[in-house]
Image (spheres, helix red, strand yellow):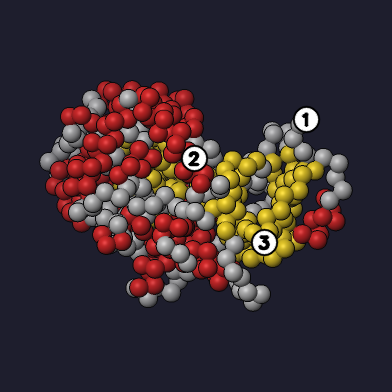
Amino acid sequence: MGKPQYKIFLGDYLNPLNDKTCQWVRQGALVAKLNAQNEYIWCFIGKEKEALAKYGQKNSLEVCEFPGGVISPGFYDTHFHWVQDDVRTMPKENLLVWLSKYTWPHEAKYKDKKFSKLKATKFSKKLLSVGTLGGACYASIHGHSVDHALKEFVGDYTIGNVLMTMNSPSYLNQSPKQAISLVKTRSEKYGKNYALTPRFAPTTHPHVMKEGSRLAKKNKNFIQTHLSETPREIEYVLGLYKELPGFEKVKSYTEIYKKCGLLSSKTIMGHGIHLSREELKMLSKSKTAVAHCPTSNAPVKELGLGSGLFDFKKAERAGVRWSLASDIGGGPFLSMLDVMRSFYKQNQKKKIKEATYIKAYFRATEAGAELLGLSKKRGNFQKNKMASFIILEKPGIKKEDMAEDVLKKIIHRGAREELSKKVLQTYYNGESVYQKT
């Protein structure tokens, strides 16, 4: 028996449209139709009564109801390290110490292919359990850590092996030749699902970044790395690069990446907290995006690295594209609900009223899909987009509640650990791929 031609999903739903607008529909309906490419595509978004009248008598039909849940688009996490899942709650004195003491020794374990494959299988299930259906992801230096992730992860991902050719521990170091060879084979094989991934400027030779950039642009890959996460990091990077030929006169961290050809419309920079006006102009002009990681950058007492808060208003004034991300293992939890809560709370403490729950939700869904070049087919509920979505646990809702109220009740209530348990089901391409037990 083949797949049904139509699927009707009934329930209350949230639909993020922009930073200020999110539809909240009670007794709603989303109807998906199977196309010639074997994809379930939305053909109706609206109310239950109208959907059943129009599609309820179709011969090839399946109807699914979610009375105890809220239907939502899946989340897009635009900056995270899947190989750091086991170190996300380790003590974080500061970024560079945390990397050398915990992160790098753990990533070295991924040299073992069996270990890597097993971890990818388990991590894939974790992603689905928190409703993440796409993202930009960092693997280890080992090429098979990219292969395993792309094979196992369900959804739309761009993934790259980190490049570490200088100033790196001996057990986690590549020669420039090895690094470029890995980039060449994976960039050709995976296209848009591969990301050129210098870990950050201090660990990657400039000529490796330049050659990697050439290959990435040739093969239509993404580019991702870290930028201006902490003042100490910036000082270290500039001190290092001013000693290198051709970089003696660089004035900023961003300029280093520009000289290496990394800025582009398919580039996602993690963090970007401490940026000058000139750097923001460089990012805007090149259409380079920023992945903002509030849980990772949060104060140490909140299990973050204490790096500071990304000034999204300043970035928006400069015309810089951005979305939200978990940055595990710098971030302590994989759930984008936790990321949204942290974004809201940190900005509200600074009395930044534009940081609403609706804005956080949009930046974790549609905005993330846009950074990944997916927004024509993913990110929210619109006709002709793929029927991929999640079911969130429904809170107590009043008749007069608007979208902001509903999101507050979903995101704000409960301990942080409980947020990762609020996803009841995850659907990809019209099929259930996770169900909470």
**From this viewpoint, which residue is outermost toward the front?**
437
Q: Which amino acid type is marked by label 1? A: Met
Residue at 15% x, 38% y: name it: 244
CA–CA distance in space, label 2 to label 1: 28 Å
CA–CA distance in space, label 3 to label 1: 30 Å
Percent of width and height locating residue 143: 36, 26
Badges 2 and 1: C-beta atoms under 8 Å apart? no
Please give the residue where the numbered disc 3 appears in the rendered image: 12
CA–CA distance in space, label 3 to label 2: 26 Å
Above or below, 199 relative to 16:
above
How many numbered tags mark residues here?
3
Q: Image check: 165 left or right of 320?
A: left
Quarter of the image for the N terminus: give it. top right
Q: Secondary structure at mark 2?
A: helix
Identify the mark nearer the N-term, 3 or 1: 1
Residue at 69% x, 41% y: name it: 40
Q: Inspect this view and state whether residue 408 appears.
A: yes
Towards the viewer: 245 or 137: 137
Towards the viewer: 97 or 307: 97
Q: Inspect this view and state whether residue 209 appears.
A: no
Identify the mark nearer the N-term, 2 or 1: 1
What numbered label is drawn on residue 126? none
Towards the viewer: 34 or 241: 34
Q: Secondary structure at mark 3?
A: strand
Badges 3 and 1: C-beta atoms under 8 Å apart? no
Q: Which amino acid type is marked by label 3? A: Asp
Residue at 45% x, 60% y: name it: 340
Badges 3 and 2: C-beta atoms under 8 Å apart? no
**Which quarter of the picture shows residue 308?**
bottom left
Please give the residue where the numbered disc 1 appears in the rendered image: 1
Please give the residue where the numbered disc 2 appears in the rendered image: 125
